[in-house]
Image: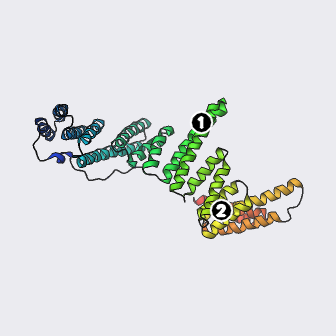
């Protein structure tokens, strides 16, 4: 469970903003005295008289907002500050500081309750803390609507509570005010979750509206993933998720065309080459797949995913050739062995840069086994078992 850190911001007492008496109305003077005495109800009482007599009293509404801030009545605080700013911007600096103070206070409450929930072993207590954390974080988001930190906490709580639908709006907000690749990926995951639930409902009931919703949620996911790719064009996970969504929508050609265009526009980009090759591999278009994957490896000789995918492509290609020959009761003319040898060479390059992963050794064993290299296959399987035991 993620543990959050509190914000460390130096804040001053809000009382500093009205030290020094000036020529004012009786109500304003009285309000200042009551504030210094921390008699907030009386301060509020005289300020309400002030703004009733003078609806354009910038100082009256400002001090009223200050009183509400001290009373932790933040919604009323915001209304009072808005009225003050409508009258004039005289107290803008002070209002910003007080709102920031209130935002930090609520955010730190949210963080504190979240950490208590995360560390609680009692389910009821944890749920209670999550609720309090959510309440404080949402209040912080109202005080400063463009604060990404508030929405991050809200998303964390909804995700931990498995309230995925409630995470959609704050995630969308995050993609707008402080976009990250992870915020787009999280949003796509939630929308896919909604889509899959509609698909399951359709499979059970055969009600067409569920299928409409399924396609709508996937289309929405595609929309945000494409926005994410515009901002983070090198992110492999965004592209991969986008391709998967296109596949679910029956529009796999759109994803392939997008990647092809990316490769043509950026031929020296190893990530684009890898992604294009990876999608072609999934479509069993092996010749073009290995071409793209080997180009990615040339651009980055330690591109593990590209080398691994190239190995798999050659291996699957060999299996396909052999199966086709068996189905026709004909010979492969050595084409299958040629592909298996290419797979072996690629896997050996892979193990030079990544020899601690059991699945790479298992793949090496499979290739050797198909080629009849029994001893090498046995040794590779043993190596995979050793590595897995160490993990």
Residue 144 image position (x, y, % from top left): 34, 45
Residue 23 in sight: yes
Residue 241's mark?
Answer: none
385, 165: nearer the viewer: 165
Within the image, what quadrant is residue 221 found in? Answer: top right
> Can you name the residue that lies furthest to the right here?
329
Q: Secondary structure at mark 2?
A: helix
129, 210: nearer the viewer: 210
Q: Residue at x 65, y 29 (%)?
A: 205
Q: Secondary structure at mark 1?
A: helix
Within the image, what quadrant is residue 45 found in? Answer: top left
Disc 1: CA contacts within 10 A as few (<14), some (14-19) or many (>=20): some
Residue 361 in sight: no
- Structure colour scheme: rainbow
Q: Is residue 293 left or right of residue 120?
A: right
Depth-wise, is mark 1 or mark 2 nearer the camera?
1
Residue 74 image position (x, y, % from top left): 29, 38
Residues under labels 1 and 2: Cα distance?
37 Å
Q: Residue at x 34, y 43 (%)?
A: 140
Q: Residue at x 64, y 44 (%)?
A: 249
* Residue carrying label 2: 308
Residue 5 image position (x, y, % from top left): 37, 51
Pick the quarter of the image with the C terminus: bottom right
Disc 2: CA contacts within 10 A as few (<14), some (14-19) or many (>=20): many
Residue 213's mark?
Answer: 1
């Amino acid at each position: 469970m993620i543990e959050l850190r509190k914000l460390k911001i130096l804040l001053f007492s809000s009382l500093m903003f009205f030290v020094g008496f000036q020529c004012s109305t009786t109500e304003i003077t009285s309000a200042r005295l009551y504030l210094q005495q921390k008699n907030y109800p009386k301060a509020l009482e005289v300020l309400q008289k002030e703004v009733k007599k003078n609806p354009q009293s910038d100082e009256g509404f400002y001090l009223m907002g200050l009183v509400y801030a001290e009373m932790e009545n933040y919604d009323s605080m915001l209304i009072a500050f808005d009225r003050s700013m409508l009258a004039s911007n005289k107290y803008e600096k002070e209002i910003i500081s007080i709102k920031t103070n209130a935002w930090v206070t609520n955010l730190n409450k949210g963080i504190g309750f979240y950490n208590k929930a995360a560390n609680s072993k009692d389910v009821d207590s944890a749920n209670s803390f999550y609720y309090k954390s959510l309440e404080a974080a949402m209040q912080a988001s109202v005080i400063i609507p463009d604060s990404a930190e508030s929405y991050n906490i809200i998303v964390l709580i909804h995700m931990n509570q498995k309230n995925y639908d409630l995470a959609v709006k704050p995630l969308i907000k995050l993609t707008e005010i402080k976009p990250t690749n992870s915020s787009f990926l999280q949003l796509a995951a939630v929308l896919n979750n909604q889509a899959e639930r509609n698909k399951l409902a359709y499979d059970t009931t055969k009600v067409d509206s569920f299928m409409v919703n399924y396609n709508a949620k996937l289309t929405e996911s595609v929309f945000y993933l494409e926005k994410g790719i515009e901002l983070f064009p090198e992110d492999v996970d965004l592209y991969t998720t986008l391709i998967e969504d296109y596949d679910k929508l029956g529009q796999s050609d759109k994803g392939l065309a997008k990647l092809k265009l990316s490769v043509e526009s950026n031929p020296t980009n190893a990530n684009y080459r890898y992604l294009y090759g990876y999608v072609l591999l999934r479509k069993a278009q092996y010749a073009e797949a290995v071409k793209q994957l080997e180009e990615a490896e040339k651009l980055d000789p330690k591109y593990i995913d590209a080398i691994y995918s190239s190995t798999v492509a050659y291996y699957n290609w060999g299996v396909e050739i052999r199966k086709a020959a068996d189905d026709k009761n004909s010979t492969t003319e050595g084409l299958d062995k040629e592909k298996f040898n290419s797979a072996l060479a690629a896997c050996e390059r892979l193990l030079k840069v990544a020899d601690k992963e059991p699945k790479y050794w298992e793949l090496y064993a499979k290739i050797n086994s198909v080629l009849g290299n029994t001893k090498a296959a046995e040794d590779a399987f043993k190596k995979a078992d050793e590595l897995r035991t160490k993990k």
